[in-house]
Image (tube, rainbow, N blue to C red):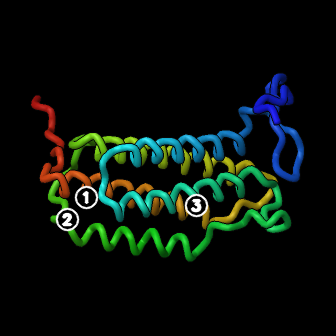
């Protein structure tokens, strides 16, 4: 089977179990940004990170693939792609709590940075926030219902990525990079 089909050459793509739509449609923007986030997590995992973080990010990558499939399907329940919900959100919250226990409480704003893995986790967090914004746009514009759990999932995931960035720096003995107010 060839990787190229030529069916998208006119600027349209097909939804799973649905019509063809423009490649810049809100639904495509949403799941395309989720795909970008998934790729960014692959970059993070290519760094030297703790085994438990790597394993959890692998789980998240699989969940993001499922989330993208759910967004690519106009009727995810009928096509059995509605796979992200309360259990996955609860797992993110538990991970936030678990990794945050290792950290000192934040006393000030911090800048993205530190070791490469932490900087990449911060970048993944910003891509996650963009995916969340694209999803909110889709929710507000879609004629088909979009599960509220998907927005909640991405919101929790961005929080987790922030905590994991801090945890990566902490594990490396590197302090958070404090924000310094510009002098007047």
**Disc on the earlier residue, 1 or 3:** 3
Residue 98 lies, in percent from the top left, at 31, 73
Along the viewing direction, whichever of 114 and 145 lies nearer the viewer = 114
Look at mark 3 in the image and give the residue it sits on: 63
Q: Which residue is painted at 33% across and 73% down in the image?
A: 97
Residues marked 1 and 3 touching at CB (< 8 Å)? no
Badge 2 marks a residue whose secondary structure is: loop
Q: CA distance from mark 3 to mark 2?
A: 26 Å
The circle on residue 103 is 2
The image quadrant where one finds the N terminus is: top right
Q: Which residue is painted at 64% across and 45% down in the image?
A: 30
Look at mark 1 in the image and give the residue it sits on: 167
For residue 106, above or below residue 102: above
For residue 102, above or below residue 132: below
Residues marked 2 and 1 touching at CB (< 8 Å)? yes
Q: Is residue 163 visible?
A: no
């Amino acid at each position: 089977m060839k990787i190229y089909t030529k069916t998208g050459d006119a600027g349209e793509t097909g939804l799973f179990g649905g019509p063809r739509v423009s490649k810049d449609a809100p639904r495509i923007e949403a799941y395309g940004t989720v795909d970008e986030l998934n790729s960014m997590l692959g970059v993070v995992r290519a760094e030297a990170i703790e085994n438990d973080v790597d394993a959890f990010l692998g789980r998240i990558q699989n969940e993001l693939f499922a989330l993208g499939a759910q967004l690519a399907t106009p009727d995810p329940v009928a096509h059995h792609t509605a796979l992200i919900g309360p259990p996955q959100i609860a797992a993110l919250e538990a991970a936030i709590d678990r990794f945050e226990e290792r950290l000192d409480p934040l006393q000030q704003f911090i800048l993205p940075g530190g070791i490469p893995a932490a900087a990449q986790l911060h970048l993944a967090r910003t891509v996650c926030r963009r995916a969340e914004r694209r999803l909110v746009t889709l929710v507000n514009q879609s004629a088909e219902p979009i599960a509220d759990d998907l927005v909640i999932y991405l919101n929790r995931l961005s929080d987790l990525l922030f905590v994991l960035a801090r945890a990566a720096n902490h594990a490396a003995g590197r302090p958070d990079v404090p924000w310094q107010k510009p002098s007047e």
